[in-house]
């Protein structure tokens, strides 16, 4: 019986996904801002010695923002491929995709404040 999983195909998919992650941070300005914010939060996390739960929340928020940014970028590219002319549905598509990023970015900012503000206040 043949092994039911094509590992070579799975590995190839990982390579494509890795290229997507690299492209996201190399070419997309907003993604680089999110990368900078994530590196800052992780550095602060080490400084303040976060608990396991706080790390889990922080990493989840970072991953959600990056994933939303990746989907937003993908939709923008797809929309541009469909039509470079003004179209109300393209406007709606891009605005909704951007809304998705904004929603998780606000959530990440709130979680960041909840985790770090009490620790920052203790410094004074
Ligand atoms: N073809 C189009 N038809 C209608 N509205 C568009 C079109 N292209 C862009 N828009 C409008 O302009 C806004 C900005 O679009 P744009 O493609 O520049 O994305 P962006 O948010 O600036 O992201 P990025 O800088 O990563 O490309 C969209 O949210 C949308 O409202």
Image: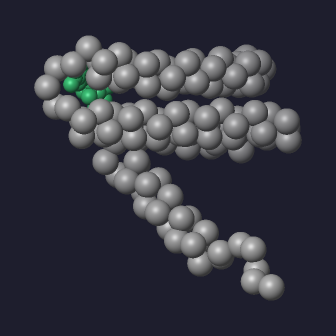
Q: Residue at x 40, y 48 (%)?
A: 24
115 vs 124, nearest the viewer: 115
Q: Quadrant of the C terminus?
A: top right
Please state if 42 lies on the left or on the right of 95 as rendered.
right
In the image, residue 95 above or below residue 54:
above
Q: Residue 19, image x and y in percent?
A: 43, 61
Q: Is residue 56 visible?
A: yes
Q: Residue at x 43, y 19 (%)?
A: 96
Q: In which quarter of the view is residue 51 placed?
A: top right
The quarter of the picture showing ligand 1: top left
In the image, residue 23 above or below residue 110:
below
73 vs 3, nearest the viewer: 3
Please state if 40 lies on the left or on the right of 124 as rendered.
left
Q: In which quarter of the view is residue 90 placed?
A: top left
In the image, residue 83 above or below residue 87:
below
Q: Residue 40, image x and y in percent?
A: 56, 38
Please state if 117 lies on the left or on the right of 71 as rendered.
right
In this view, the residue farthest toward the bottom is 1
84 vs 111, nearest the viewer: 84
Q: Residue 99, image x and y in percent?
A: 46, 18
Q: Quadrant of the N terminus?
A: bottom right
Q: Residue at x 47, y 53 (%)?
A: 21
Q: In which quarter of the view is residue 47 placed?
A: top right
Q: How many numbered discs sit on the rendered protein? A: 0
The colour mode here is one colour
């Amino acid at each position: 019986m043949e092994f039911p999983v094509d590992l070579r195909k799975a590995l190839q998919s990982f390579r494509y996904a890795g290229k997507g992650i690299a492209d996201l941070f190399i070419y997309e300005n907003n993604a680089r801002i999110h990368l900078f914010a994530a590196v800052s939060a992780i550095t602060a996390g080490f400084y303040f010695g976060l608990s396991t739960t706080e790390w889990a929340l922080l990493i989840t928020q970072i991953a959600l923002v990056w994933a939303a940014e990746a989907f937003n970028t993908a939709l923008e590219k797809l929309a541009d491929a469909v039509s470079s002319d003004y179209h109300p549905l393209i406007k709606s598509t891009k605005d909704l995709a951007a809304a998705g990023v904004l929603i998780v970015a606000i959530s990440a900012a709130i979680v960041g404040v909840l985790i770090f503000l009490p620790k920052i206040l203790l410094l004074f």
